[in-house]
Image (cartoon, helix red, strand yellow):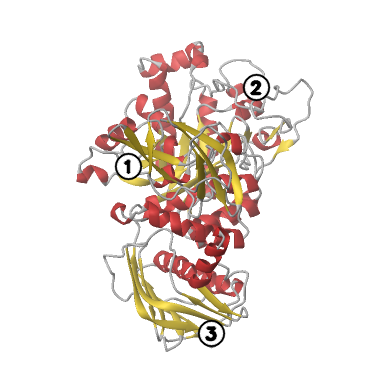
Amino acid sequence: MKHWQLALAALLLLLTSSCGESVTVSEFAIIPEPVYLVQKGRSFTMDRSTKLCFENLGQNTPTAKYIASSLRRMHIRPAFIGHPERNCITFALTDSVNHLLGNEGYSLKVKPEGIYISANTEAGLFYGYQTLIQLFPDDITTSSYHRVTLPECTIVDYPRFEWRGSHLDVCRHFFSVKQIEKHLDLMAAYKLNRFHWHLSDDQGWRIEIEKYPQLNDVGSWRVDRDDVQWGDGEPARPGEEPTYGGYYTKQDIAEIVEYAAQRHIEVVPEIEIPGHCSAVLASYPEFACDDYPYTVAVGPYWPPKAILCAGNDEVLQFLYDVMDEVAQMFPGEYIHIGGGETYKDNWETCPKCHARMRKLGLDNEDQLQGWLIGQVAEHLSRKGKRVVGWDEMLDCGPVSKETVVMNWRNVTGAVKAVRHGNNVVMALPDYCNLDYCQADPAHQPPSFGIELPLSKVYHFNPVPSGLSKLETLHILGGQCFLWTDYIKNYDQAEYMLLPRLCAMSECLWTPSDRKDWMRFRQHIERHKARLHANGYRCCLGSFRPTVTKVMEGNEWLVTLSTEVEGTYVYYTLDGTDPTPESPLYVSPLHLPRGTQLRTLSLYNEHVQEGVYEFNF
């Protein structure tokens, strides 16, 4: 039997259906993996007579309305009832607090008489519902089933970390409100709860600020260079009209914040200061240290020398005014104020900056940055906000213990911050930068050319080694990043995110002792199908085999493994290119020294990525 026929037969065993009217689910593929899951022998069949009950929760609460609306989109329209009964899906807020579940945990039980989900909070019920959706058939949104039979099970679940984030850069390339909402839906499906929204940078200012309209009239637009590779475009020419860009109005932001809140996601806006400010200085040149004619950048000018003048009192007032409007738009606890990659060449020659340093008794420009960041942090603290900043802040003098350090450079910074008493969000590029290629760059869309496959993302551990148990409490969690230098549209953004965002969700939700790469590798294939059915674009994955070898006598014992479940690897040992007629790898190979192994991967009956060569 051909490989695709075997795969189809396995799928039919998993999901058996009759004429598209009924379906029986036999196995689950839940991502992120729950803390506790046991499947039992009986089953429950959901049909058109199944009811919906919200216990201790009004039908008009945001979570209840979300659940009812979501079920309708899956062609499930249960009638509301006031009290649980047989053949009912019940969502219940607990009468007394279950300390095991905490603020975001839930209990989900499928029994022959119905489905019962309970939690301490609406957030817990919401996450329980996201798991319930994953119990349904993968094509539930595109197929209308009259009957869905689920196996009896008990799930108890709660997150490992409180900060489970996804960052999106809309400065280098701009995305619409609807595309942002689609991203929030994706986050919600995988129980991520912090949307880090990168709203200002050299390449564009993306948020409406009424008191400084030039930020939007000028700073939100740049000349269009998207017809060439990122970084190859020449700067704006005198008189050239800026045509690329856009910004989010206060009405747009209110819509997105409300949309996120209904999905229990906090929007964390980022206003990058004091560097990466070409868009600001193009709008308000008087805030610069020099008289250089700044324009909104069309590429990654390096180093990014556009920096606000720290010696100018008008700059400080500008920052206060901007943060006041930002704080009003975003009701969440956190505001990210950047502080990263700050090149201070202009400060070194600026009379105003030097005067400020003398007045404050500062020894160097790093301390001046620390003072400026501290002033903004104190201002926001008075408004009930907590500041998040890049870990470069640690190089600029004392940091308030109320400040959250977003650690991206190395683990050393995280340890330093934790031992100072700061909370930390881990975001190491080697695991978290999803703008890196998912596979061999030669076979992927243009990017920085760095490879970060799904398997490596899955092995991200936000807790640095060497911390005491008490110190680990300062690790709030972690997040993935999508910088959009090379990402010109949202379809490409989804391709870069998926399925790696699913791996990140399991790193941040699932206890470390419950993680299992081989299980995840199987489950993610189901999720690719589910995501595709919901209109998302996914990368297939990396098809270069992973090679491990050990010496046995005078030969190598060579083992090949593949990232993508269902990949078939053919090989040759004589220097010729393999084909689907070559030997199929099925077990470790004994290879003499000097052997050249050449491989070819097939997936879904198609050759993937070409021939790879390994020498022993």
Label 3 CA crowd tier, 10 Å (few <14, some 14–19, many 20+): some
Which residue is under mark 3? 47
Vertical position of residue 369 compared to residue 319: above or below: above
| CA distance separating discs 2 and 3 | 63 Å
Please report contact status of discs 1 and 2: CB closer than 8 Å, yes or no. Answer: no
The answer to whether 43 appears left or right of 101 in the picture is right
Left or right: where 51 falls relative to 609: left
Tag in front: 1 or 3:
3
How far across and how far down the image is residue 400, in percent? 33, 35
Given the image, on which type of amino acid does mark 1 rest? Asn
- Give the crowd class for mark 1: few <14, some 14-19, many >=20 residues within 10 Å: many
Q: Is residue 17 above or below residue 209?
A: below
Identify which residue, 552 or 307, lies in the foreground. 552
Label 2 sits on residue: 294
Position of 174 compared to 387: left or right?
right
Q: At x 43% / y 59%, what residue is drawn?
A: 31
Q: Secondary structure at mark 2?
A: loop
